[in-house]
Image (cartoon, helix red, strand yellow):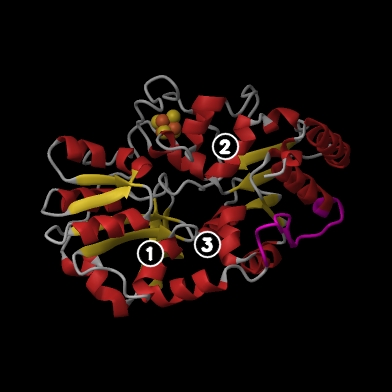
């Protein structure tokens, strides 16, 4: 990545332009929401909120795939790990608390759990251990969903490997954010990596329907500052369009190969998001023609009816952009990255974990 995207002179210039433009909106607060844990990392790590004028706010939405994974899916994965399956999943996912403990707790109790870095690791695990029944707990947005899809459509899933799909789609969650009456938004920053797969054209109907600017941004500090400036520029011109500021990676059409594989491998279903509820057409389930790889069709895995969010945890409000983590009374007290109580404190993309590590909201006196 070019150093220019972190160049202090460029950041300073963008700051001046943002302040100048924000002066046109002194009678109101401009609220911009992003839906990506990596964007929250950039914003908090680089202290971008401290560079913004008081009437421009950037809040975090449901951008962490680990955080929004519902309690019941975690419990299903634990049940499988305790009932004869080797469970493979990502490291962050294994630490997320559920009403039945975490996947790592299950491992401590004797379940066979393997932490993997990619789906290729899972394939290797299954091919090297044909005597084992392996389940991959597949989480993530459009960024990770293609890795499983490509293997399914190319018939490279061995017969001892099954998928527990908890993949979710970002655009439907953006629409939910925009439907909230109590959190009015003036602009959305769309995630660059998701958009590299989907293409930015997917946001155009959302911009149009909700009369709101949506700007696709990369992950360097200048990318995020530029996206904020672009939203302010659109607002000043009374525009509400989708704009792509990550053209070094994102096209309007997206990754056609990945999109074709996902269309073939999955069916789009209504899906639950932790703390938010069921969002229509927001999840990927394995397509019927690959049902031999769908663990939900092979096993009757019990489904929990317990609470989705632990008592006292305010992750639901955080994921909907209603409050900052610092407003949770457990933040950095009983709930820390080392001892997370709620899902937002677990992984590198969780808003609470990011704020605990880097600080996030500097002035909480008047929210
Ligand atoms: Fe939940 Fe912990 Fe965040 Fe509070 S600080 S909202 S308990 S994850």
Q: Which residues are magenta?
A: 234-251
The residue that label 3 is drawn on is 172
**Image spot of residue 39 (x, y percent):** 60, 43
| In front of the other: 206 or 29 | 206
| In front of the other: 263 or 321 | 263
Task: Locate ligand 1 by image quadrant.
Answer: top left
Q: Determine contact: label 3, label 1, CB under 8 Å.
A: no
Taking 78 as reference, is 29 above or below it?
Answer: above
What quarter of the picture does the N terminus occupy? top right
Look at the image and say whether residue 244 sits in the magenta stretch: yes
**Image spot of residue 122 (x, y percent):** 30, 56
**Image spot of residue 116 (x, y percent):** 33, 47
The residue that label 1 is drawn on is 148
- In the image, the residue with mark 2 has its CB under 8 Å from the nearest atom of ligand 1: no
The residue that label 2 is drawn on is 41
What quarter of the picture does the C terminus occupy? top right
What residue appears at the point 35 percent right and 41 percent down from the top-left corner? 91
Give the class, few, some or many, for how many residues have Cα within 10 Å of label 2's Cα (few <14, many ≥20). Answer: many
As drawn, the residue found furthest toward the front would be 128
Quarter where residue 4 is shown? top right
Look at the image and tell me whether residue 32 can be seen. yes
What residue appears at the point 47 percent right and 37 percent down from the top-left corner? 348
Q: Between marks 1 and 2, how big is the CA–CA gap?
A: 26 Å
Give the class, few, some or many, for how many residues have Cα within 10 Å of label 3's Cα (few <14, many ≥20). Answer: some
Look at the image and say whether residue 353 sits in the magenta stretch: no
Ranked by sequence position, the earlier of labels 3 and 1 is: 1
Q: Nearer the viewer, mark 1 or mark 2?
A: 1
């Amino acid at each position: 990545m070019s150093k220019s995207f972190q160049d202090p002179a460029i950041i300073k210039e963008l700051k001046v332009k943002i302040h100048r433009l924000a002066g046109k909106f002194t009678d109101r607060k401009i609220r911009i929401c992003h839906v990506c844990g990596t964007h929250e990392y950039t914003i908090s790590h680089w202290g971008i909120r401290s560079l913004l004028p008081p009437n421009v706010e950037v809040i975090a939405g449901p951008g962490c795939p680990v955080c929004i994974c519902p309690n019941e899916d975690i419990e299903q994965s634990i049940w499988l790990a305790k009932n004869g399956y080797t469970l493979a999943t990502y490291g962050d996912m294994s630490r997320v608390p559920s009403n039945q403990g975490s996947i790592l707790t299950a491992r401590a109790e004797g379940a066979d759990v393997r932490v993997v870095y990619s789906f290729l690791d899972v394939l290797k695990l299954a091919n090297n251990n044909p005597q084992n029944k392996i389940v991959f707990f597949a989480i993530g947005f459009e960024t990770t969903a293609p890795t499983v899809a490509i293997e399914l459509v190319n018939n490279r899933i061995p017969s001892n490997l099954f998928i527990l799909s908890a993949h979710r789609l970002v655009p439907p969650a953006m629409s939910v954010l925009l439907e909230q009456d109590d959190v009015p938004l003036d602009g959305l920053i769309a995630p660059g990596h998701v958009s590299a797969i989907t293409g930015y054209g997917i946001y155009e109907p959302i911009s149009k329907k909700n009369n709101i600017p949506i700007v696709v941004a990369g992950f360097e500090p200048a990318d995020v500052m530029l996206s904020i400036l672009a939203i302010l520029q659109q607002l000043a011109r009374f525009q509400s369009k989708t704009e792509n500021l990550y053209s070094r990676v994102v096209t309007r059409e997206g990754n056609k190969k990945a999109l074709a594989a996902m269309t073939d491998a999955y069916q789009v279903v209504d899906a639950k998001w932790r703390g938010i509820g069921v969002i229509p057409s927001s999840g990927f389930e394995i397509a019927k023609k690959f049902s031999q790889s769908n663990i939900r069709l092979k096993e009757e895995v019990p489904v929990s009816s317990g609470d989705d969010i632990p008592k006292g945890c305010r992750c639901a409000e955080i994921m909907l952009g209603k409050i900052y983590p610092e407003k949770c009374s457990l933040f950095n007290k009983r709930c820390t990255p080392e001892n997370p109580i709620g899902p937002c404190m677990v992984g590198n993309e969780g808003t609470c974990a990011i704020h605990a590590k880097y600080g996030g909201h500097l002035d909480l006196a008047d929210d």
